[in-house]
Amino acid sequence: MTRRSREDVVKAVEDIGVVAVIRLQDPTALREVVQALADGGVRAIEVTMTVPRAIELIAELAPALPEGFLLGAGTLLDADTTRRAVGAGAQFIVSPVLRPAIIAAAHEEGVPAMPGCFTATEILSAWDAGADVVKVFPATSVGPAYLKDIRGPLPQVKLMPTGGVSIDNVGEWLKAGAVAVGVGSALLDAKAIAAKNYGAIAENAKRMVANVRAARGAR
């Protein structure tokens, strides 16, 4: 897997528009889930540190992914784990919280940092600290109108809502100003994965990508 610049990775995330957030408790299904997402057109994933053996799984996945696929690490809470994740092959770092040390560690390793923020003050603080994209989390609590309100005074900030994004409402988030969205359960149906029905995952991904394209075409 070719190492890209921070700018190239951010642009690729924006172009794809969707980052699939992987929180599987059964890591044996990860390869099949990733393939299903890729088949459906979602080519950016975030393996969270809550997945058992997450660092090892990133190391196993990284060399096997097709060219152009983006592999990130999520739920990072400290700088040391950030460095380990990048060393394993993560191309971008996502955190549920704002910790400047994580942003600094990611940048030292040459990858983008996407810290989680909720309030306008946190969002601007993250941007001023060098965040490449700000993850608005938990977006479940606010909805697309909140994103539009934030974008009014802070148009320069790249926002990626996570939580509350579904196949049906993804277009609303993008029209409100999101550069991309983070999506977990709306793509990764737990029952389908348990039943090894990976075709359902691919179909979810196809629908999500189609709605992203439709929303962007309507701008």
Image (tube, rainbow, N blue to C red):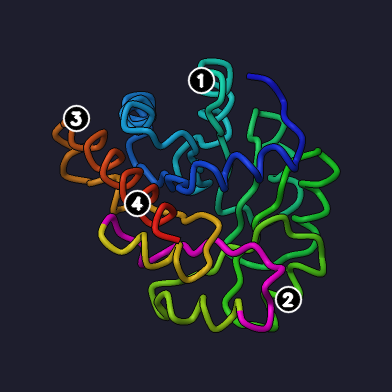
Q: Nearer the viewer, residue 166 or 171?
A: 171
Which amino acid, mark 2? Answer: Leu
Magenta residue span: 152-167
Q: Earlier in the sequence, mark 4 or mark 3?
A: 3
> CA gap, disc 4 to disc 1?
27 Å
Specify which label sits upstream in the sequence, 2 or 3. 2
Secondary structure mostly seen in the magenta stretch:
loop
Q: Nearer the viewer, mark 4 or mark 3?
A: 4
Residue 84 in the image: above or below residue 48:
above
Q: CA distance from mark 3 to mark 1?
A: 19 Å
Residue at which label 3 appears: 199
**Residue at left offset 31%, top offset 32%:** 40
What whole-number distance in Å separates the C-alpha atoms at marks 2 and 1? Answer: 34 Å
Label 3: how many residues lie within 10 Å, few (<14), some (14-19) or many (20+)? Answer: some
Secondary structure beneath disc 1? loop
Please tell me which residue is depicted at 53% across the width and 46% down the height of the picture: 49
| Pointer 4 or 1: first along the chain | 1
The disc at residue 214 is 4
Residue occupied by mark 2: 124
**Element under disc 2:** helix
Label 4 CA crowd tier, 10 Å (few <14, some 14–19, many 20+): few
Q: Nearer the viewer, mark 2 or mark 4?
A: 4
